[in-house]
Amino acid sequence: MTNQAATIFDDALNDSDKSFTVPPNRAYQVFSAVARITTTATVGNRTPRIEFRDEDDNVIFGVTGSTTVAASQTDVAFGEATEAAASDLTIVPVLIPPGGSVRYYDNAAVDATGDDLVVRIQAKVYRA
């Protein structure tokens, strides 16, 4: 297995639930993920969550952040996931297999189709 670093992102302004599927013959090891959110006026606190899933959609790692974002906010930080213990979402270096996925979303699902979440993930990509 050889590896290279890659940035995986979704800048589409269409929801607060982003999933990235690991392509065939590849495996991901996420070492950081950063998200920004713009929220609608729908009342409620949004809470960031990141999950790594295997090819059968089982959660192999997941963590929910401690910070929240309220309604009517524009382009604010929505959690930073890193291997550093001081980050809001501390992740562990799990190898996500081909067909697995990374999901970054609002755990509270306050206005999933109205809020806009932008996610950038840094990962080591391995040939499987």
Image (cartoon, helix red, strand yellow):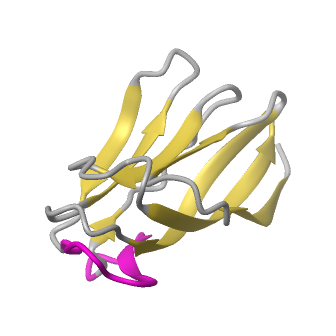
The spot of residue 118 in percent (x, y) is 56, 67
The spot of residue 1 in percent (x, y) is 82, 42
Residue at 63% over, 31% down: 97
Q: Residue furthest front?
A: 41
The spot of residue 70 in percent (x, y) is 19, 74
User: With respect to residue 123, does 107 lie above or below?
Assistant: above
The answer to whether residue 81 is left or right of residue 28 is left
The answer to whether residue 91 is left or right of residue 29 is left
Locate the C terminus by quadrant: top right
Secondary structure, magenta segment, majority class? loop
| Count of residue discs | 0
The spot of residue 77 in percent (x, y) is 39, 82
Residue at 29% over, 78% down: 72
The answer to whether residue 126 is left or right of residue 86 is right
Residue at 58% over, 21% down: 55
Report the magenta residues as a range. Answer: 68-86
Of residues 36 and 25, which is closer to you in this image? 36
State yes or no: residue 80 in magenta: yes
Of residues 86 and 117, which is closer to you in this image? 117
Of residues 35 and 101, which is closer to you in this image? 35
User: With respect to residue 26, does 15 lie above or below?
Assistant: below
State yes or no: residue 75 in magenta: yes
User: With respect to residue 69, does 59 lie above or below?
Assistant: above
User: With respect to residue 89, does 72 lie above or below?
Assistant: below
Residue at 48% over, 71% down: 35
The answer to whether residue 20 is left or right of residue 77 is right
User: Which of the 4 quarters of the picture holds residue 59?
Assistant: top left
